[in-house]
Amino acid sequence: MKKHVQPVDKILLCSLCCLLIIGLFMVYSAGTVVGEDARQDPYYFLKRQFLFTAAGLAAMAVLSRTDYRVWQRWSPVLLLSCYLLLVLVLIPGIGMVRGGARSWIGVGAFSIQPSEFMKLGMIIYLAFYLTRHQKRITSFGKGMLPVLTLIFAAFGLIMMQPDLGTGAVMTGTCFVLLFAAGARIRHFFILGGAGIIGLAGLIVSAPYRLQRITSFLDPWSDPLGAGFQIIQSLYAVGPGGLFGLGFGGSRQKHYYLPEPQTDFIFAILAEETGFIGAGFVLVLFGVFLWRGLAAAMTVPDMFGALLASGICGMIFIQVLINVGVVTGLFPVTGITLPFLSYGGSSLTLLLAAAGILLNITKHRTTYD
């Protein structure tokens, strides 16, 4: 039997490129009204998205050529750097407040979001840690507890901003990694019960979160307040029908739907391209995740398998939450749609993660 090392997965790369191209078109369409009124430039968001995409593609190109195993050596440094950034963003004068959350650090004309770095940094470190301590993972005290300490320390710092959506994505991704590493199912049931209690406490402790839950259950009870975003999102998705209103034809982007170019870009996509366009995008995500998980199952070492699983898990959870919010299945959380939504830190870090995943696909093996 002869072992073959494969080239980069062209199907995964093609699906990613299609998502990026669709994202550029939709950022332009969704952001023209806000860009023209607020910045006197209808191309404002598109031009910046081009810069973010170019930076992300450059990072992806470099990382796709960098052996993924090198990240084992640097994973502790990466994780510590991410913790440091999460602390720095909480310091007044360093962290920038937007939308009531202190989640950004200004860098010249741009800004970075440390919580986005933490998602990828935590994936890389846990893949390294779980590879070295796989035999311990079935023990709660020796295996899971040290990992949970790292996870909840990062989650706590993110919640101090506060940013429940990003914290939920990071935590969910970490649980995917624990499951892939062989953690006991009964431990997940225990953690699930504790998580429900903790989530209830977080909701009760912040009135705006409680409003989001009540508006999710009955948005029409406060159509101009807490239920506004969900209602306007459904007004975008519903009229799209099968084929949509046509590119640029969205009505909801005219200040009916807040942040149409970021959190609710899928609603604009559904409105303008209909069920066919929205379904095609979901198929592209499905193809991306299929090829990523295929690489995770065929890469020859556990670190690569866990790293690929973590990256795929992060993207899947983020897509699930974003689309769920837009279609009214989940409460509003402020999560962007990977590769499509406008945003620097999110897009750049996701493309960097995709670069690592592409390198892993080069090392997948088959036998004849």
Image (cartoon, grey):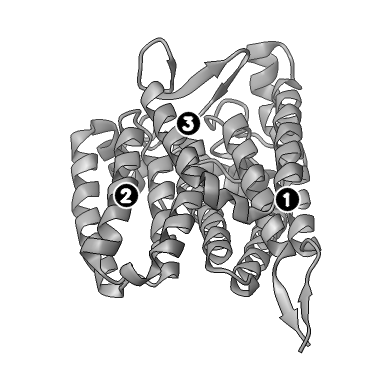
Question: Residue flagged by tag 2: what amino acid is it?
Answer: Leu
Q: Disc 1 marks which amino acid?
A: Ser
Q: Position of residue 236 (x, y in %)?
A: 59, 43
Q: Measuring 29% from the left and 38% from the top, which residue is drawn there?
A: 156
**Real-space CA distance between mark 2 and mark 3, rounded to the nearest whole angstrom:** 32 Å
Front-most of 323 and 296? Answer: 296
Q: Which residue is mark 3?
A: 114
SS of the residue at dot 1?
helix
Q: Secondary structure at mark 3?
A: helix
Whether tag 3 and tag 1 are in contact, CB under 8 A, the answer is: no
Find residue 217 and name its label: 2
Q: What is the crowding at mark 3: few (fewer than 14 residues within 10 Å), some, or many (at least 20)? A: many
Q: Secondary structure at mark 2?
A: helix
- What is the spatial separation of the Cα atoms under label 3 and label 1, in whole angstroms? 23 Å
Distance in Å between CA atoms under marks 1 and 2:
44 Å
Q: Earlier in the sequence, mark 1 or mark 2?
A: 1
Q: Residue at x 64, y 21 (%)?
A: 34
Q: Position of residue 194 (x, y in %)?
A: 20, 56
Closer to us: mark 2 or mark 3?
Answer: 3
In the image, residue 52 sits, relative to residue 59, either above or below, namely above
Picture mark count: 3
Mark 1 crowd level (few <14, some 14–19, many ≥20, 10 Å Cα): many
User: Which quadrant of the structure image shows residue 346?
Assistant: top right
As drawn, the label of residue 64 is 1
For marks 3 and 1, the one nearer the N-term is: 1
Foreground residue among 303 and 53: 303
Where residue 339 appears, as percent x and y from the top left, is 66, 44
Neighbourhood count class around disc 2 (C-alpha, 10 Å): few under 14, some 14–19, many 20 upward:
some
Q: Earlier in the sequence, mark 2 or mark 3?
A: 3
